[in-house]
Amino acid sequence: MKIRAISGIIMLAVLVSCGGDKIKKALDLKLEGINLVQSSDYDEALDKLEQSLDYNDQDPETYYYIGNAWFGKNDRDKAFDYYCKAIEVDSNYAQAYVNRGKIYSMRNDKDNACKDWLKAESLGVTNLKEDTKFCK
């Protein structure tokens, strides 16, 4: 019985440590990608961020920054899709609503832009007053 319990604990420790390595790798790649987005190196950023998803495809922030990279490359449709994916993964990821709202606005879809911006405000974003003053 003791051997079985010890074996179970060892197996659990191995699984957790392996998972931890995956999460660390995903985080390292994501941080590299974020830095590259911020320095406008969008192609390299996309490469790092997509690699990060290979290790953790449930991180809304990674999808959000991939959206920002596509936005920086002037591909609004791909950016839109990645903001939607960030929201799909975490329906409370406020910044994705803000940026998706910007794209809706660029598409002259004011109703959906307002919905996204008001949702972002409800999640705590406070700098949208100028955008949402006509929404209420």
Image: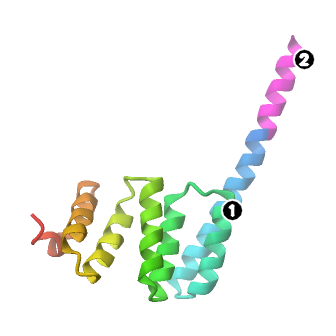
SS class of the residue under badge 1?
helix
Please provide the residue range marked out in magenta.
1-14
Q: x%, y% of residue 74?
A: 44, 89
Q: Which amino acid does label 1 sit on?
A: Asp
Q: x%, y% of residue 35?
A: 56, 78
Please check the rendered image and state whether residue 13 is part of the magenta-colored stretch, yes or no: yes
Alpha-carbon span between mark 1 and mark 2: 36 Å
Residue at the spot 61% in from the left edge and 85% down from the top edge: 43
The label number, if any, that marks residue 75 in the structure image:
none
Q: What residue type is labelled 2?
A: Ile
Q: x%, y% of residue 24?
A: 68, 57
Q: What secondary structure characterizes most of the magenta part? A: helix
Would residue 81 be visible to someone looking at this image? yes
Residue at the spot 41% in from the left edge and 59% down from the top edge: 87
Would residue 127 be visible to someone looking at this image? no
Question: Residue 116 or 22: which is nearer the viewer?
Answer: 116
Q: If you read the primary sequence from the N terminus, does the residue marked by circle 1 or circle 2 appear first?
A: 2
Q: Is residue 70 above or below residue 58?
A: below
Q: Residue furthest right?
A: 3
Question: Residue 18 or 96: which is nearer the viewer?
Answer: 96
Q: List the residue tagged with mark 1.
A: 54
Please check the rendered image and state whether residue 53 is part of the magenta-colored stretch, yes or no: no
Q: Nearer the viewer, mark 1 or mark 2?
A: 1
